[in-house]
Image: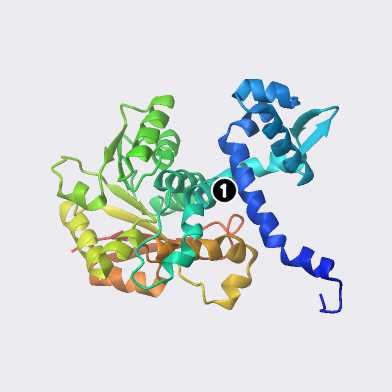
Amino acid sequence: MSATESFEARLIDAIQPLRHYVLSINLYHLFETGLFASLSEKGSLSPAQIAELHGMDASRLRVFLGYLRNEGYLKEVDGKFSLSDQGRRIEEFRPWYTMLVGGYNETYMQVGEKLKQGSGWASRNLEQVGTGSCGISRHDAIPLTRSLMAKVPGKCTRLLDMGCGNGRYLVDFCEALPEIQAAWGVEPSAESCREAAQMIARHGLQDRVHIVNASAGEFLRSGMGIEPDFVVLGFVLHEILGQEGAAGVRAFLTQMVARFPDLHLIIIEVDQQMDSARAMQHGLGIAYYNPYYLAHPFTQQCLETQPFWEGLFAECGLEVVAKEYTDPQVDSTGLEVGYLLRKPRS
């Protein structure tokens, strides 16, 4: 677009980010209010019917529905609204909205303030970050974890998930792998622990899955008499690195292996490649990883590169048994990497 084009044409082009910003927030509301579920289940409803069903203000609701109709996510026929094909297709990707809008929107709104030296950390909604992350993991981290587990002879019978979020990881694994006799999830967010307990109860897994509301360090210092054969650390180490530095990560991994010497560790992290033109030219690189990278240094988290992590594992005396990436049909960036580690056998 050249400067000789009309102001209106340049304005339309310039404010497209505002359109997408508002749209992402209201798609998040479509899910979180239960409106998506109602329209999906019941089909075509009038604003009055929806308002009565959800206890909403009918006049405001009518504008909200009209807004999403204009964006192509709803259809209106004879005054009744239903999901469009585009609207139905987006349900699969709800976890990304949960994490980035529900979890990190407040973070992004504080970026300007937190650029100042000594301004402290931005806030985030840990429960929404955890819920969104667990939902995303069904597509990438969980299949990656199962693939790494398959590299070990024998079966996983006792699983420990550090930073378990809403328990989605543990539920999926216990349902898919009946040989898991016991599983434990450790999660610092009390709200996520409550959600995990509810999910575990809904799936009838109370006898196999146990949730502990504690930080990773608190858990390792506790006297719980458990002996897992696998521990999953999905996106946990960059939290410890941001809050306690490399020394804190080394101490954590060393304590973990000292307490459970026969343990296999599965570690999943995101490679820090924000300055890579190749990574950022990828569609998923700019659409997802670029905002993901932005949030972390403002919320006391520290993403690092693969060579950094591999050097740190070596310092901890851990052997890399296997290294894999997400299925390229899901994510072909190569930015999410999984490691299978263990203490070298004598």
Q: Quadrant of the C terminus?
A: bottom left
State the residue position of label 1. 97
The tally of labels here is 1
Specify whether 304 is left or right of 288.
Answer: left
Q: In which quarter of the image is the N terminus?
A: bottom right
Relative to 327, is 276 above or below?
Answer: below
- Image quadrant of residue 209? top left
Amino acid bearing label 1: Tyr
In front of the other: 237 or 80: 80
- Image quadrant of residue 48? top right
In front of the other: 339 or 102: 102
Which residue appears at 48% of the width and 66% of the height?
112
SS label for mark 1: helix
Which residue appears at 45% of the width and 67% of the height?
271
The answer, for residue 72, to whether it is visible in the render is yes
Relative to 314, is 30 above or below?
Answer: above
Relative to 74, is 126 above or below?
Answer: below
In front of the other: 34 or 236: 34
Crowd tier of the residue under label 1, counting other residues whose Cα lies within 10 Å: few below 14, some 14–19, many 20 or above: many
- Image quadrant of residue 73? top right
Specify whether 220 is left or right of 30.
Answer: left
Percent position of residue 43, x then y: 73, 26
Relative to 2, is 80 above or below?
Answer: above
The answer, for residue 73, to whether it is visible in the render is no
According to the image, what is the colour scheme of the structure?
A: rainbow
Specify whether 266 is left or right of 102.
Answer: left
Which residue appears at 43% of the width and 25% of the height?
202
Percent position of residue 188, x then y: 30, 46
Percent position of residue 227, x then y: 21, 43
Which residue appears at 49% of the width and 46% of the height?
132
Percent position of residue 262, x then y: 21, 53
